[in-house]
Amino acid sequence: MGEFKVHRVRFFNYVPSGIRCVAYNNQSNRLAVSRTDGTVEIYNLSANYFQEKFFPGHESRATEALCWAKGQRLFSAGLNGEIIEYDLQALNIKYAMDAFGGPIWSMAASPSGSQLLVGCEDGSVKLFQITPGKIQFERNFDRQKSRILSLSWRPSGTHIAAGSIDYISVFDVKSGSAIHKMLVDRQYMGVSKRKCIIWGVAFLSDGTVISVDSAGKVQFWDSATGTLVKNHLIANADVQSIAVSDQEDSFVVGTAEGTVFHFQLVSVTSNSSEKQWVRTKPFQHHTHDVRAVAHSPTALISGGTDTHLVIRPLMEKVEVKNYDAALRKITFPHRRLISCSKKKQLLLFQFAHHLELWQLGSTVATGKNGDTLPLSKDADHLLHLKTKGPENIICSCISPCGSWIAYSTASRFFLYRLSYERDNISLQRVSKMPAFLRSALQILFSEDSAKLFVASNQGSLHIIRLLEGSFKHLHTFQPQSVESMCLLAVSPDGNWLAASGTSAGVHVYNVKNLKLHCTVPAYNFPVTALAIAPSTNNLVIAHSDQQVFEYSIPDKQYTEWSRTIQKQGFHHLWLQRDTPITHISFHLKRPMHILLHDAYMFCIIDKSLPLPNDKTLLYNPLPPKNESDVIRRRTAHAFKISKIYKPLLFMDLLDERTLVAVERPLDDIIAQLPPPIKKKKFGT
Amino acid sequence: MVQLRPRVSRTPASASAMVDEGQPASEEEAEHGLLLGQPSSGAAAEPLQDDEEGDSEFDEDEAPEELTFASAQAEAREEERRVRETVRRDKALLKEKRKRREELFIEQKKRKLLPDTVLEKLTTAPQTTIKKSPGKLKEVILQKKNEECEKGSDSKKTKEKVQKVQSVGHNKSYLAVRLKDQDLRDSRQEAAKAFIQNCLYGPGTNRTTVNKFLSLDNKRLPVKKAAAQFLNNAWGTQRKQNAKRFKRRWMVRRMKTSKN
């Protein structure tokens, strides 16, 4: 494999934003997650829980509610008072409609999917009709005294429960008037000064209303009489979210202490028909408030302020008990936030509102395997580039020669010329960027830094030639399909450009002739990483189900090695990895090596060595020197995996002897989160 | 009130004073008699000869003044006319004053408004199209206001009226937005954020710091470890800077002295 000097970088201060709302769509098995900075991410739960789409955030958009409506339409509402519809094909916002009720706290789609109900700050509940193009305001329900914090439709569509501060109202949909007003105790059988906030309500089809509030209670109400039926005190802190399954036999609640409770409808005795709600399982997967929960037919999904998305499949609902039924915790992003300039040893870090440019440190010492070498020159923070405007940065890139930086937000594209000589750094903006470049999903520079490739969210691919201080638009490849392109890769010799959409196959374009060369056959799992090898021009594609393909671009077919490994199949431990491969790179002098990494391991695939079958050890540690040659030969196989550096956000080969690994320890993320609820433990 | 006859005082008073008092009294009473519609002539036309009789005690040789009805009437009419004149003059003056004030106000208001030409153009220009100015917040505001206007025409609710001003003149493109609306919206959003911050992290909530939270595990281990401490890199930045500067100066001084 060779010896490498590894730059271990831990100064990337990446802190993801907390999860605020979660909405599950049953038909397409997709999960929409909205974060506190306004980003909305769509996870495909059947494609190995991969994040396939995302909508960048906005400073003024404080999303408080998210819901799916009929026909795969996604709506969100927030404290700026607007209802936003997202266009899932074009990956942008269709429109934002002001509800004129002040900040919106809650939103619910009707069971039929054709109406939308919104609860506002001024106490009004507004009904909107979902028309094919837009939504239209229909009418207002009776106005309440305090803000409506949670809403729920009855499955039959006739009644609505609205949770407010200190009371819950039940409305009749046809007349719009409040039928019942159920007052909630501020504290469980006691008096308290703090108001009781009803964080969530759920309406069942038999007329039961379940409410969760800030006193830690789960209460069952009868909506026909407006009385309290049952009271469960489950936590010392707020219970902040509730989600009911479609069959209405189980629901899940999330508390501010990080515990998620599962309630199920079980029969009183084994053969009686009478059933009651019982708290069955507690799960403690979070450290901070669990502000959103969802219930899919087979799993409980929770997300909160500690930024993890936890998907817990329920054992009784899962048919096949294999690795799919294990807990999934999604912490790290599924796309690359770091780009690297190999010549000048610069790293560009992408944050939500700014970019940071760092120069790697250097060392002159040498040592043995496993030594930590002292730095002779520290890593230098060269540039802190703030973006103008309230929008988040979608993607960014630095050219391999280190003289161009480009980044894009939803409405603008920025290109800068960077000159860095001997501790003098200067940045110059290239003005008058064309309008079609905005809202780019992926930016890539060619190896010689002469061309810029931009994949926009309309699906078109733009090629720009970069001249000294200015640019010239060369060509635009129009989309074959309507879907937007997500990942780009360019060959080191500059001839070929590969672009992957979300569902179509990978398109390969000839850059010299500006024509489409070929299309890799479509695979039903989305592409997570893409790269073209230097001399052989083999396109290596990694999918979200951990399959890796190698396609030869000049020959327009899969390579021999790829066919062999597909026939034999990957090792079962390789396929059971949780996190997707986010970056692939190659060694210049060794064409048989492929370097790829995911969040918890990095691997060098040696195509000349035999492939492992299921019986061999996949993660074989480096054998000590005094081991016999026989054992070493037996355990040698193509996949050399190392788990020394984790959690990895980025790993790349700088030159023949140097690697750079950007790590982000989980503790450093937790150190910057908001305060959690105090837990009193005996003996502390 | 009974009109008291002027009494004969002990001290001799001037006769003219007494006569003066008597005369106006009689005139007034003559008028009063006239107004009451009493007959213009006759015995009744000469009422209250009693006063004069009282006065005549002093001026016995002077005959009482003969006051014909006609003269008294004429005088009375004069008096009335005078009063009416003054009232009319007063009213006229007031009216003029008011008129002048009105004009002043109109003038002031006119000064505040835009020039007539601009107003004409605004009312006649079509309200549907808006020139889209490239990028940033303006677009977002444009769209928002568009929506508001459309919605305002759709539903019957009273909404905040948005003053939409069309681009006047082809070389300018702008959109006039009521700042009051924007401020109101921002203040409400701030209030909502403050509410939720108070609910979750305000007083009365049982929150603790992150390192205390993570230290709980350390303290419960069989081999107790120290609490988790997060480095506060921002501590004493001024002190560290001073120390660095001092060190540099000291090194330089040291070099100088070692050279010499």
Image (tube, coloured by chain):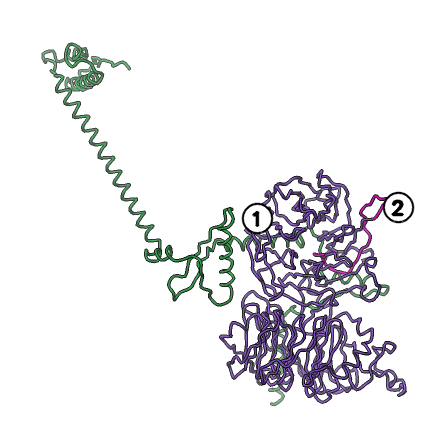
The secondary element bearing badge 2 is classed as: loop
Q: Is residue A368 visible?
A: yes
Chain of the residue that carries numbered disc 2 in the rendered image? A
Position in image of residue A439 (x %, y %): 57, 70
Chain of the residue that carries numbered disc 1 in the rendered image? A
Which of the two residues, B66 or A31, is positioned nearer the viewer here?
A31
- N-terminal of the pair, mark 1 or mark 2, is 1
User: How many numbered marks appear?
Assistant: 2
Mark 1: amino acid: Glu
Position in image of residue A618 (x %, y %): 83, 77
Task: Please tell me the numbered disc located at residue A271.
Answer: 2
Residue A228: image quadrant is top right
Residue A616: image quadrant is bottom right
Say whether residue A279 is magenta: yes
Say whether residue B231 is magenta: no
Left or right placement of residue A614 versus residue B180 in this view: right
Q: Colour of chain B?
A: green
Q: Colour of chain A?
A: purple
Left or right placement of residue A40 versus residue A579 in this view: left
For disc 1, the marked residue is A138
